[in-house]
Image (cartoon, helix red, strand yellow):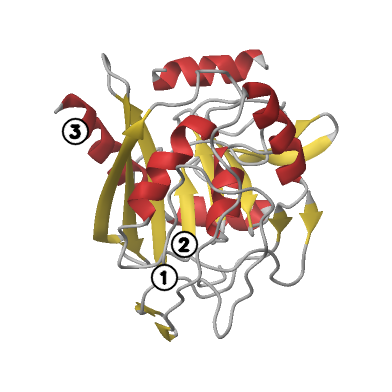
Amino acid sequence: MKAAASSAGRAGFPGADKRERKRARSRGQATDSGGRGNARVTAIRHALAAASSLRRSDLPTADGPIGPHSAETMLHPWDLSPQEAIALQYRLAGRVLLRSLPKRMRLIAGADVGYERHGGRVAAAVAVHVLPRLELVELVQGEDDVSFPYIPGLLSFREIPPLLSAFRKLRNQPEVILCDGHGLAHPRRLGLASHLGLWLDLPTIGCAKTRLVGEYGELGLSRGQYRSLTHRGERVGLALRTRSGVKPVYVSPGHLVDIDGARRLVLRCCRGFRIPEPIRTAHQAVQRAVRA
């Protein structure tokens, strides 16, 4: 993990721990504004196999239109063995960047996935809301076959392909993505939010209902109270009370976001519920999809 004061990495909007096993079972189974001007594309060593790529289009933001970008971002192949996936996580974790979010943000996305109860398909949804009132402006969905085995700590290799399929359909490019999952608060510092952030080269935040790794001190009962989540001597996120008297959520930066910025944005997106509104919308959509 690296701290960064400036943007780096690929350009382009598109384009076992016990607690982790508990979280996986319970599931059933950024801003750069996309970069203005000429963005840089990094060469990738591995050929992409059966992966989705995302494209950027002209989109309004708080500061005006974003220019078109036709480059496709490719991070790695998906046809990996579990051992290869673990080794890849260690390598990719070194590319995760932490930095402050800009003061002005407008389009915030929520991302979630759901599994068919008796099938081999996984559905994904992305909901884009507009700050400050959090109106829903776009909701897209994607799906894919479950092609990677269920292994705690490697869920992103099952869930990111359908998420990429959904992101490819967006007409409004989000400035930050809130994920139902973890970011740095992962045994290898590459939870779903961090992995997705590297794919999209956008700021991402993990916001999970269950703790995966780490410990924290006594937490007050009022909304906004938080305690640092530490794992192996490293601050990897926060336990955050988003609603008074209700269980906390576990917030960790994914990519291109710092811990305090992640906390502030998650609180800003919670409107009377424990879970941020963009993630709630995406979750409701995938639940409808898997029941259909």
Front residue of 273/149: it is: 149
Residue extending farthest to the left is 292
| Tag 1 secondary structure | loop
In the image, is residue 64 above or below residue 103? below
Three-letter amino acid code of the residue under disc 1: Arg
Left or right placement of residue 204 versus residue 134 in this view: right
In the image, is residue 125 above or below residue 24? below
Residue located beneath label 3 in the image: 288
Does residue 216 appear anywhere in the picture? no
Q: Residues within 10 Å of mark 3 (few under 14, many from 20)?
A: few
Q: Earlier in the sequence, mark 1 or mark 2?
A: 2
Alpha carbons under labels 3 and 2: distance apart: 26 Å
**What residue is drawn where x is 43% and y is 18%?**
26
Residue located beneath label 1 in the image: 56
| Tag 2 secondary structure | loop
Would you say the residues marked 1 and 2 are in contact, meaning their CB atoms lie under 8 Å apart? yes
Three-letter amino acid code of the residue under disc 2: Pro
Does residue 111 appear anywhere in the picture? yes
Front residue of 192/275: it is: 192
**What residue is drawn where x is 45% and y is 30%?**
245
Q: Which mark is residue 14?
A: 2
Left or right placement of residue 139 versus residue 3 in this view: left
Q: Position of residue 137 (x, y in %)?
A: 25, 63
Q: Position of residue 216 (x, y in %)?
A: 71, 29
From the viewer's perspective, is the residue at label 3 or at label 1 nearer?
1
Q: Position of residue 83 (x, y in %)?
A: 69, 23
Would you say the residues marked 3 and 1 are in contact, meaning their CB atoms lie under 8 Å apart? no
